[in-house]
């Protein structure tokens, strides 16, 4: 299937600084693509290039098969977006800010504005001027502007910013629903791995402007480090025992033995038996599963080491 | 046309909800009324005998009659014809940057070119409204003051010259729009306006020979407001003025089209 969002060797250089370097991404229809990276990794620059706000130094991007170009206004008919801080006209009310978007998108009927206000739970604030909104409600207004015209493509930069936990869940479910039931393609950037892993179907990790890893959430689960951690009264003796029994292992900084093979992880009771029988019983035996954040940081640090 | 209409609607909504529009109207009315007050003091010096500042200014006017008052209004129109529309331009273009909403209007189905056009249309009418209001309030203040030598023909003549000079100065707001966009804020274009004012004054005071070649001095030469001692506008003057206006417009359009918008 053709990619709805596509970038080919997209780069943006500011002098010597390579803010984005040769990023190629393909996002299929109905996919939720999580774009993950630390602050300053190049997420926002990539989104801005996808939106035609920044001209790439090299490479190109396509939305729905049409090349992104600042002169091609029609391309934005089916694109909703939220870039970084959700700014709105501070002197205008929530409704008026949405009215501006409605007019700029040539949409008929004011009821669409009312509907999106209700959908994003902005009803009590519809006549409040944007300057007086809390960060969370300003974010909701930003999302309302992105969703007003029921776009086929959503480009969202840190959409969970400023939202309370209930709001984060609500927006997550809404985006999932849009992707699953209406085939909306979502490209969402964040530095919060936990949030992205709950939302996205595929994740790309960008670091120092380079896309260092791209895989589905399921693949990422597999790639996460798992091991059986073992501590005994005599670690040296235990190491010799594992070596003799052909177990693959590493030792952690604190001297903890980490058995990495499935034969150990899936049968810890067997390891316990071996240790007890050798007269060196374990004082600690646990299956360790790397959490997503640690995985993310490890992937980034591996790439840093490669350099 | 649909794009232009949509963009215009949005610009008008932003203006309607802003205090700046009302403040600008009040300011221009206030300036006119102050001119009327000065004429009143020129006519009745005893009213300001305790205020050295007012009486000195009023004494500069000379005779307190309609011909002098029209001259004063014309001069005022020339100065405020640059500052007023300039400030309006800076606000209309600069607020997109200061409110950080520029990114919200660039990836819309409305072409960026039409957004610029709508902004310039709004600036044009807003500026013309301000200058018209200043003239009308000025006439009203003059009538209240009871100036001598009223002449309807003189009013019509001055009205034509004033309108012509206002239109020409408003046409020169496009370079201000460009500088506002490039600098992404208010400070640099305000500095640019001040610089224009200073250069124009220098040209009229001591470097009259260069006046026909400086865009912002040319409207005064074309309309004859600068006085008989200054050189007349030449063909090149018209070309320079038109080129400055066109360059500002095309430059702004190119900036919106090709520059990176952070």
Image (spheres, coloured by chain):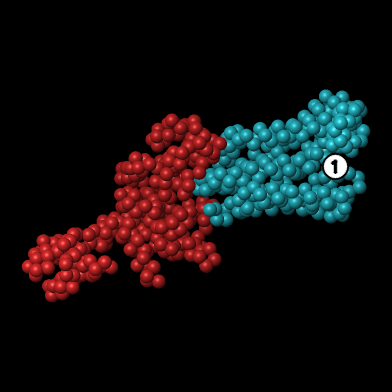
Chain colours: A red, B cyan
Residue at image position (48%, 65%) is A18
Residue in the picture at 68% in, 49% down: B189
Q: Residue at x 79, y 50 (%)?
A: B198
* Residue A205 position within the rendered picture, expressed as x and y whole percent measured from the top left: 37, 59
Residue A287: quadrant of the picture: bottom left
Return the residue nearer the eye: A210 or B159. A210
| Left or right of residue B175, residue B151 in this image | right
Q: Chain of mark 1?
A: B
For label 1, the residue is B225
Q: Nearer the viewer, residue B227 or A65?
A: B227
- Residue B101, image x and y in percent? 54, 45
Front-lying residue, A191 or A107 = A191
Work out whether residue B79 can be spotted: yes
Q: Quadrant of residue A122?
A: top left
Name the image quarter holding the N terminus of chain A. Answer: bottom left
Q: Is residue B38 above or below residue A301?
A: above
- Indicate the secondary structure of the residue bearing disc 1: loop
């Amino acid at each position: 299937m053709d990619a709805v969002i596509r970038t080919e060797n997209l780069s943006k250089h500011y002098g010597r600084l390579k803010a984005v370097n040769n990023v190629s991404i393909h996002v299929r229809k109905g996919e939720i693509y999580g774009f993950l990276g630390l602050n300053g990794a190049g997420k926002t620059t990539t989104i801005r290039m996808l939106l035609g706000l920044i001209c790439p130094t090299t490479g190109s991007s396509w939305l729905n098969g049409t090349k992104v170009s600042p002169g091609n206004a029609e391309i934005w008919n089916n694109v909703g977006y939220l870039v970084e801080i959700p700014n709105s006209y501070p002197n205008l009310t929530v409704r008026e800010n949405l009215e501006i978007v409605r007019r700029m998108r040539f949409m008929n009927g004011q009821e669409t504005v009312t509907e999106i206000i209700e959908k994003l739970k902005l009803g009590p604030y519809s006549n409040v001027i944007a300057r007086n909104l809390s960060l969370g409600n300003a974010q909701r207004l930003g999302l309302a502007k992105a969703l007003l015209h029921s776009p086929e493509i959503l480009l969202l930069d840190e959409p969970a910013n400023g939202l309370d936990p209930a709001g984060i869940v609500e927006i997550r479910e809404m985006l999932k629903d849009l992707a699953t039931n209406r085939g909306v393609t979502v490209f969402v950037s964040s530095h919060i791995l936990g949030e992205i892993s709950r939302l996205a179907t595929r994740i790309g990790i960008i670091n120092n402007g380079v896309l260092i890893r791209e895989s589905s959430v399921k693949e990422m689960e597999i790639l996460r480090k798992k091991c059986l951690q073992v501590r005994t009264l005599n670690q040296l003796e235990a190491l010799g025992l594992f070596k003799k029994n052909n177990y693959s292992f590493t030792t952690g900084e604190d001297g903890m033995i980490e058995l990495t093979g499935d034969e150990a992880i899936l049968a810890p009771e067997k390891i316990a038996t071996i240790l007890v029988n050798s007269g060196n019983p374990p004082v600690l035996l646990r299956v360790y599963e790397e959490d997503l954040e640690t995985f993310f940081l490890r992937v980034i640090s591996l790439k840093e080491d490669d350099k | 046309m649909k794009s232009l209409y949509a963009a215009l609607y949005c610009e008008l909504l932003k203006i309607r909800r802003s205090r700046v529009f009302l403040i600008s109207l009040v300011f221009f009315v206030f300036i006119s009324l102050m001119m009327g007050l000065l004429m009143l003091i020129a006519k009745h010096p005893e009213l300001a005998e305790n205020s050295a500042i007012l009486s000195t200014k009023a004494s500069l006017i000379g005779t307190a009659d309609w011909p002098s008052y029209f001259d004063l209004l014309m001069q005022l129109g020339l100065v405020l014809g640059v500052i007023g529309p300039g400030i309006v331009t800076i606000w209309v273009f600069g607020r997109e940057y200061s409110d950080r909403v520029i990114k919200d209007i660039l990836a819309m189905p409305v072409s960026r070119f039409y957004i610029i056009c709508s902004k310039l249309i709004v600036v044009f009418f807003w500026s013309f409204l301000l200058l018209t209001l200043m003239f009308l309030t000025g006439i009203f203040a003059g009538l209240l003051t009871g100036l001598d030598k009223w002449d309807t023909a003189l009013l019509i003549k001055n009205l034509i010259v004033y309108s012509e000079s206002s239109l020409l100065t408003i046409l020169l707001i496009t370079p201000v729009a460009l500088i506002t966009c490039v600098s992404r804020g208010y400070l640099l274009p305000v500095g640019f306006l001040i610089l224009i004012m200073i250069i124009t004054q220098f040209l009229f005071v001591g470097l009259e020979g260069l006046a026909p070649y400086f865009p912002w001095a040319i409207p005064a030469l074309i309309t004859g407001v600068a006085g008989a001692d200054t050189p007349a506008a030449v063909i090149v003057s018209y070309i320079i003025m038109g080129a400055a206006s066109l360059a500002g417009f095309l430059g702004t359009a190119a900036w919106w089209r090709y520059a990176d918008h952070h």
